[in-house]
């Protein structure tokens, strides 16, 4: 709304109040016994509609396929869970920084996209963890960097608001203090383009992302042996939405038992995804 329309709106409100006062009208009191208006329940358990928020540049978990359609391991899992529970599924590519606001507004009702649960337990209700993950450092294969100690004076990039950024600002802050700089970027595909071009010296990312990028260009990159941290992926829901979290966990267990999860994972084996780290059994 422009400043002009705000002023006009305010003037109209004042005139309306004046007319009411002239007629002797008084505001209607709220009944003392009336219940306060409650927020609409937008959870999947209540609506039978799973609205999945995801980063569309996060292969192999969620990305745009060659056919222009959204694809990925997590998105296929979400579709399979929705089928199992007889729910509708809606995929929403989101700005990762806006995920909390979108969840709070009901625009999405879950985050399913290689979503690390550690450190976020106070902000979301999670399914059981379904995939073991780690935060790692990837460098150019020909750059002579062989260990974390070699990163001193180097430029390292990671995704903004990512688990890697949190680790480097927290438990691994002493390591990050040795870098020339720790930079952030919107998505990892661009980060690896910068690494390949020499614009940065290293990328801090999820193990799954590292495996994906290295499977595409096995001679270009090297992953350092030392992990920054180990953690788990889980499906995130609005805080308190235990009903949906429980239903999704139970569905994932059934899909593992009937072989569906393994079939989905096999589609992305050439992108570095493996069932070795699957957790829900």
Image: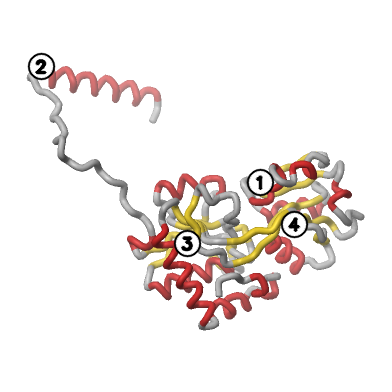
The residue singled out by tag 4 in the image is: 136
Label 2: element kind: helix
Quarter residue 176 falls in? top right
Q: Residue at x 39, y 72 (%)?
A: 85
Mark 4, mark 3: which one is toward the viewer? Answer: 4
Q: Is residue 29 above or below residue 166?
A: above
- On the image, the x and y values in percent for residue 14 come to 23, 19
Determine which residue is flagged by label 1: 166
Q: Earlier in the sequence, mark 2 or mark 4?
A: 2
Of helix, strand and loop, which one carries label 1?
A: helix
Identify the residue position indicated by label 3 in the image.
91
Kindly report the distance in space between the C-alpha atoms of the residues bearing marks 4 and 1: 13 Å
Q: Element at badge 4?
A: strand
Marks 4 and 3 sit apart, C-alpha to C-alpha, by 28 Å
Quadrant where the C terminus sits is bottom right
Residue at the image position 70 percent from the left and 52 percent from the top:
190
Q: Residues within 10 Å of mark 1 (few under 14, many from 20)?
A: some
Q: Count all numbered tags in the image, as a single digit.
A: 4
Q: Earlier in the sequence, mark 4 or mark 1?
A: 4
Around disc 4, counting alpha carbons within 10 Å, would you say few (fewer than 14), some (14 to 19), or many (20 or more)? many
Q: Are marks 2 and 4 in contact (CB under 8 Å)?
A: no
| 129 lies left or right of 184 | left
């Amino acid at each position: 709304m422009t400043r002009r329309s705000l002023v006009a709106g305010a003037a109209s409100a004042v005139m309306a109040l004046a007319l009411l006062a002239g007629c002797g009208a008084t505001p209607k009191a709220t009944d003392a016994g009336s219940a306060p208006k409650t927020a609409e329940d937008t959870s999947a358990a209540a609506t039978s509609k799973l609205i999945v928020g995801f980063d569309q540049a996060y292969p192999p978990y969620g990305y745009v396929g060659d056919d222009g359609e959204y694809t990925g391991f997590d998105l296929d899992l979400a579709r399979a869970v929705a089928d199992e529970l007889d729910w509708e599924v809606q995929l929403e590519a989101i700005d990762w920084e806006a995920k909390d606001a979108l969840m709070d507004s009901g625009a999405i009702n879950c985050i399913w996209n290689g979503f690390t649960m550690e450190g976020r337990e106070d902000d979301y209700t999670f399914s059981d963890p379904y995939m073991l993950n780690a935060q790692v450092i990837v460098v150019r294969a020909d750059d002579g960097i062989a260990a974390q100690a070699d990163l001193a004076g180097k430029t390292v990039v990671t995704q903004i608001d990512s688990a890697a950024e949190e680790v480097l600002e927290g438990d691994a802050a002493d390591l990050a203090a040795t870098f020339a700089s720790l930079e952030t970027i919107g998505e990892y595909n661009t980060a690896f383009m910068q690494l390949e071009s020499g614009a940065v010296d290293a990328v801090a990312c999820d193990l799954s992302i590292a495996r994906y990028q290295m499977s595409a260009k096995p001679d270009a990159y090297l992953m350092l042996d030392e992990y920054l941290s180990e953690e788990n992926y889980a499906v995130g829901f609005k805080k308190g939405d235990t009903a949906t979290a429980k239903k999704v966990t139970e569905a994932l267990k059934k899909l593992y038992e009937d072989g569906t999860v393994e079939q989905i994972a096999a589609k992305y084996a050439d992108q570095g995804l493996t069932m070795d780290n699957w957790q829900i059994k």
